[in-house]
């Protein structure tokens, strides 16, 4: 099991296709990104990841998907 507070250089930063929980297709490209997050949110995310044994990166990918679903424009077949 990975430490919930894994550094960007750890195996936690491997592509989602290598993550058994990622559900990503092996042909999908992934990139690393850097964001600044308030320390209190970092602590809460680390604790959640530790408690649930789900990687922080998985929660962050889910959050991005939720935001894109909420605010993003449809990419195909939608009315604009």
Image: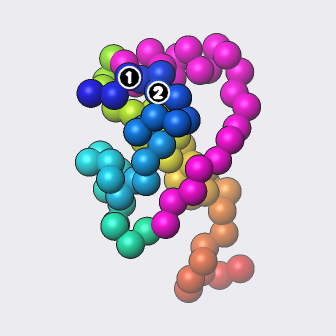
Compared to residue 60, the image places residue 49 above or below, namely above
- Which residue is rendered at x = 70% and y = 38% of the image? 35
Residue 59 visible here:
no
Label 1: how many Cα within 10 Å (few below 14, some 14–19, many 20+): some
In this figure, which residue is indicated by the disc labeled 2? 6
Residue 69, given in percent of the width and then of the height, sits at 56, 58
Residue 26 visible here:
yes
Magenta span includes 49: yes
- Position of the N terminus by quadrant: top left
Q: Of helix, strand and loop, which one carries label 1?
A: loop
Label 2: how many Cα within 10 Å (few below 14, some 14–19, many 20+): some
- Which residue is rendered at x = 67% and y = 57% of the image? 71
- Distance of label 2 from label 1 (alpha carbons): 5 Å
Q: Are marks 2 and 1 in contact (CB under 8 Å)?
A: yes
Give the left or right position of residue 26, taking residue 58 as reference: left
In this figure, which residue is indicated by the disc labeled 1? 3
- Which residue is rendered at x = 68% and y = 41% of the image? 34
Occupied quadrant, residue 55 = top left
Q: Which residues are magenta?
A: 29-50
- Position of the C terminus by quadrant: bottom right
Q: Residue 32 bears which disc, if any?
A: none
């Amino acid at each position: 099991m990975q430490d919930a507070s894994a550094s960007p250089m750890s195996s936690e930063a491997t592509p989602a296709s290598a993550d058994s929980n990622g559900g990503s297709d092996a042909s999908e490209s992934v990139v690393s990104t850097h964001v600044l997050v308030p320390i209190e949110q970092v602590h809460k995310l680390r604790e959640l990841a530790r408690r649930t044994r789900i990687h922080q990166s998985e929660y962050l990918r889910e959050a991005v998907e939720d935001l894109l679903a909420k605010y993003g424009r449809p990419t195909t077949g939608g009315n604009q």
